[in-house]
Image: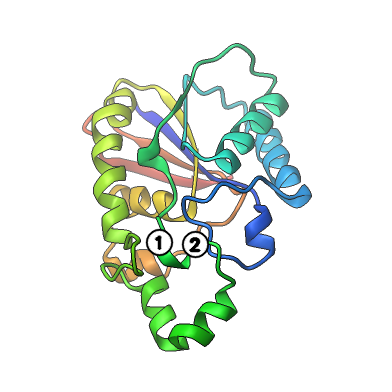
Amino acid sequence: MTGTLILVRHGQSEWNLKNLFTGWRDPDLTELGIEEARATGKALKAAGIAPDLYYTSALRRAQHTLDLMLEEMEVLNVTITRNIALNERDYGDLAGLNKDDARAKWGEEQVHIWRRSFDVPPPGGESLKDTAARTLPYYEAEILPRLKQGKTVLIAAHGNSLRALVMAIEGLTPDEILAREIATGEPTLYRIGPDGKLVERVIL
């Protein structure tokens, strides 16, 4: 008996559109983001997927994405678990800055290092390694046991918190996960065996 983990990155946010570092700041979805979330819900419904459990972060853009997906899936009266462990990477002093302005202030190379290195955090923020250090223990304690029992679990979260999960599930190196793009509104399904190991990866 295998469990199914569905990972969904939130739809486009207002700050994605404005090219701002977002992190733990809390903008909502754009009209495109709303459309992406609805399309994801429709795709899951068309695939006949009925999750048993629902998880999201403490941030509005991920919560709104999940709400819209559930609406399209015609799922009502379910318990949604929201936890800060699934929050996006904290960009610290970069949060709220336009990415071009950040490059002008600190230099293209330094900003690239902060964005694309595994273990170098921006000032006052988190690296991907730091993000994984809070996301993975939560996954292992709260979510993985349900998957081992054969449950279907849906997580709506963020590019970097999902990267941390994908890295662990697929056994990727830091370089491999940093090269992996997590598309908005594109559900990825992982079949997880009773031993907690990956059986199959499917992109809807």
Distance between the alpha carbons at the discs numbered 1 and 2: 6 Å
Circle 2 residues within 10 Å: few <14, some 14–19, many ≥20: some
* Contact (Cβ within 8 Å) of mark 1 with mark 2: yes
Kindly identify which residue carries mark 1. Answer: 92
Counting from the top left corner in percent of width and height, residue 151 is at: 39, 22
Total count of labels: 2
The correct choice, above or below, for 167 with respect to 176 in the image is above
Circle 1 residues within 10 Å: few <14, some 14–19, many ≥20: some
Q: What is the secondary structure assignment of the residue under circle 2?
A: loop
Q: Amino acid at mark 1?
A: Gly
* Residue 18 badge: none
Counting from the top left corner in percent of width and height, residue 199 is at: 33, 41
Name the residue at 38% across, 68% down. Answer: 178
From the viewer's perspective, is 100 left or right of 177? right
Q: What is the secondary structure assignment of the residue under circle 1?
A: helix
Q: Amino acid at mark 2?
A: Ala
Name the residue at 36% across, 69% down. Answer: 122
Counting from the top left corner in percent of width and height, residue 47 is at: 63, 32
**In this orientation, does residue 185 appear?**
yes
Given the current orientation, which residue lies at the most extreme top position?
A: 77
Q: Nearer the viewer, residue 102 or 129?
A: 102
The correct choice, above or below, for 171 with respect to 38 in the image is below
**In this orientation, does residue 171 appear?**
no
Residue 198: quadrant of the picture: top left
The correct choice, above or below, for 173 with respect to 46 in the image is below
From the viewer's perspective, is 130 left or right of 89? left
Counting from the top left corner in percent of width and height, residue 19 is at: 63, 68
Which part of the image, by quadrant, shows the C terminus? top right
Name the residue at 43% across, 44% down. Answer: 87
* Residue 95 badge: 2
Name the residue at 50% across, 63% down. Answer: 181
Q: Nearer the viewer, residue 96 or 8?
A: 96
